[in-house]
Amino acid sequence: MKKLIVIIAILSIAFVNAQAYEGKGDNKFQVGANFQNNASGLNVSYDFGVGENISLGLTSTYALGIDDKLDADFGDRFDIKARFNANLGNVVNIDENFDIYPGLNFGLKNFGGHLGMRYFFSDGFGIFTEFNTPIAKYNSDTLTPAEKIHNQFTINLGATFNL
């Protein structure tokens, strides 16, 4: 019983010290799953704080679970984007461990927007989710089923780390 109380106390201290976004110089790495219509895959991203509420970064997704009938090659499966985030955790002030970040991204497939949320359980580890949608697709003609990968509403879920 004493060991359990000590473990809970240590974890409570770790939770109190967590901070979702620290401002200029902040470094975040995220890895998780990507879910979309007709595909699922791996998503990784990196964000660097350039101001109190602004971060810039890169995100990349590779679609793995694709039906063979879509005939998707590497170019259809892969996407990389530069991104801008407005980190609003300290503005909405829900919890210092929580960050919400709307943003814009510019990638190989489209220009789009995203809404993300992070929650940190400790100084270095948390969970995240992001909702992404294209605003302007580069191919304005009718997209093939393979070209629709990364050109539709997607959801990312996974782990986030402070670097």
Image (cartoon, rainbow, N blue to C red):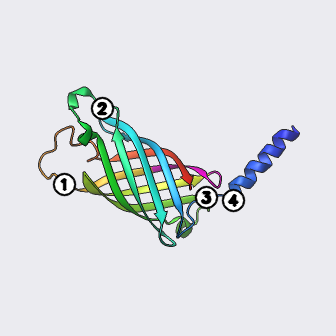
The foreground one among 64 and 8 is 64
Q: Are marks 1 and 3 in contact (CB under 8 Å)?
A: no
Query: N-terminal of the two: label 2 or label 1?
Result: 2
Query: N-terminal of the two: label 2 or label 4?
Result: 4
**In the image, is residue 18 above or below residue 141?**
below
Q: Are marks 2 and 4 in contact (CB under 8 Å)?
A: no
Residue 13: within the magenta?
Answer: no
Assign a secondary structure to mark 4: helix
Query: N-terminal of the two: label 2 or label 3?
Result: 2
Circle 4 sits on which residue?
A: 17
Residue displayed at 82% across by 40% down: 4
Residue 128: within the magenta?
Answer: yes
Mark 2 vs mark 1, CA separation in Å: 22 Å
At which x and y percent is residue 83?
37, 60
The residue segment tinted magenta is 121-129
- Given the image, on which type of amino acid does mark 4 rest? Asn
- Given the image, on which type of amino acid does mark 3 rest? Asn
Circle 2 sits on which residue?
A: 66
Residue displayed at 16% across by 44% down: 143
User: Within the image, what quadrant is residue 63 found in?
Assistant: top left
Query: N-terminal of the two: label 1 or label 3?
Result: 3
Mark whose residue sits in front, 1 or 3: 1
Circle 3 sits on which residue?
A: 97
